[in-house]
């Protein structure tokens, strides 16, 4: 019975949940997408998903969304309503999952959350992780690093299009990155192989490059120069806000340390390199 039941995917209209849903559908799983937005329903259904209208901070709507569900992909975010809301999303979802008897929760957190980073949106995910452990719900925790697709997002793409990207990261500092599809693939693999993945925490990175090297690859691909400038810390705070500036400072002083080689070896995961990602991404084509 459990095999044929749907997997509830939070964030299915977003980056990580979207990648998870696509990978689950590709493998023949039934997907129930969780969204707050009735305007998304027909698009999600067209993609082959069932839809549950619900909110991660609204327990009754989650109880309904979780009806008959044994597997649940969870993503939380502070970027709409702040840090406390992210914790509230996680805690509410985990309580609802426990009450519903969920047998496999896959939560996507962020790499290095357990290293006392002092970065507010890492600390929130650490709280959610701890809540998961305390709850006893059987779980796999994924901890992705910086998304490769950030370069194609509305906060970085306009500068790249203008030919100069300025970020606070030191030009000699390697930055670990992961492709969204790899997160989706690992989550789908975890659901397909619970015995190997239950109780596991996987830090996920697929590549590691300095920002000037990353931009050189992009530049070569589009046939136009893209320069890199290190932005001073004071400007970073004004531009991105205190929380994101704290993260960039941590990237410079500490940084992610995922063992990419052992991830490939241990789980047999094919991880995307930045050059592979940009070979086919539509946002890259839009730069030409
Ligand atoms: N960017 C990076 O490099 C990076 C790296 C590691 C971790 N992260 C973390 O990734 C998280 C964001 O993930 P993402 O980029 O995949 O998300 P996203 O594309 O920003 O989309 C957010 C998703 O969350 C859903 N959502 C938001 N609030 C909700 C609520 N109260 N109830 C139900 N659904 C809700 C939205 O669904 P609806 O609007 O349809 O309801 C949407 O699908 C953040 O916590 C960030 O810290 C980011």
Image: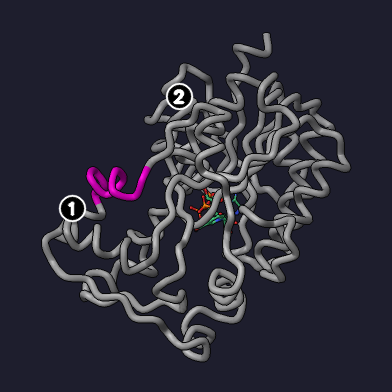
- Please tell me the numbered disc located at residue 196: none
Q: Which residue is mark 2?
A: 25
**Is residue 4 covered in magenta?**
no
| Position in image of residue 48 (x %, y %) | 42, 25
**How busy is the neighbourhood of tag 2: few (under 14 within 10 Å), some, or many (20 plus)?**
some
Within 8 Å of ligand 1, the CB of disc 2? no
What residue range appears in magenta?
273-282
Mark pair 1, 2: CA separation: 26 Å
210 left or right, relative to 116: left
Quadrant in the rendering for residue 148: bottom left
- How dense is the environment of label 1, judged by Cα within 10 Å: few (below 14), some, or many (20 and up)? few
Q: Secondary structure at mark 2?
A: helix
Residue drawn 66% across the image and 32% down it: 72
Q: x%, y% of residue 188?
A: 53, 28
Q: Which mark is residue 285?
A: 1
Is 47 left or right of 286, judged from the image as shown? Answer: right
Residue sticking out furthest to the top: 1
């Amino acid at each position: 019975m459990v095999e044929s039941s749907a997997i509830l995917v939070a964030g299915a209209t977003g980056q990580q949940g979207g990648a998870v849903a696509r990978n689950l559908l590709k493998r023949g799983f039934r997907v129930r997408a969780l969204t707050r937005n009735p305007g998304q329903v027909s698009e999600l259904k067209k993609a082959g998903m069932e839809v549950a209208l619900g909110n991660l901070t609204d327990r009754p709507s989650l109880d309904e969304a979780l009806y008959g569900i044994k597997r649940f992909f969870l993503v939380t975010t502070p970027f709409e309503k702040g840090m406390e809301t992210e914790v509230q999303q996680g805690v509410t979802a985990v309580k609802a999952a426990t009450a519903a008897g969920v047998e496999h929760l896959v939560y996507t957190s962020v790499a290095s959350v357990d290293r006392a980073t002092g970065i507010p949106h890492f600390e929130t995910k650490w709280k959610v992780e701890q809540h998961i452990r305390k709850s006893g719900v059987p779980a796999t925790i994924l901890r992705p690093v910086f998304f490769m697709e950030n370069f194609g997002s509305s906060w970085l793409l306009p500068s790249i299009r203008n030919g100069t990207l300025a970020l606070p990261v030191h030009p000699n500092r390697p930055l670990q990155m992961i492709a969204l599809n790899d997160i989706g693939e690992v989550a789908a693999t975890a659901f397909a192989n619970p015995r190997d993945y239950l109780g596991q925490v996987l830090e996920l990175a697929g590549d590691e490059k300095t920002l000037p090297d990353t931009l050189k690859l992009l530049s070569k691909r589009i046939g136009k120069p893209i320069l890199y400038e290190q932005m001073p810390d004071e400007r970073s705070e004004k531009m991105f806000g205190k929380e994101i500036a704290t993260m960039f400072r941590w990237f410079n002083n500490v940084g992610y340390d995922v063992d990419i080689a052992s991830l490939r070896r241990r789980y047999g995961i094919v991880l995307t390199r930045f050059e592979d990602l940009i070979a086919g991404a539509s946002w890259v084509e839009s730069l030409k």
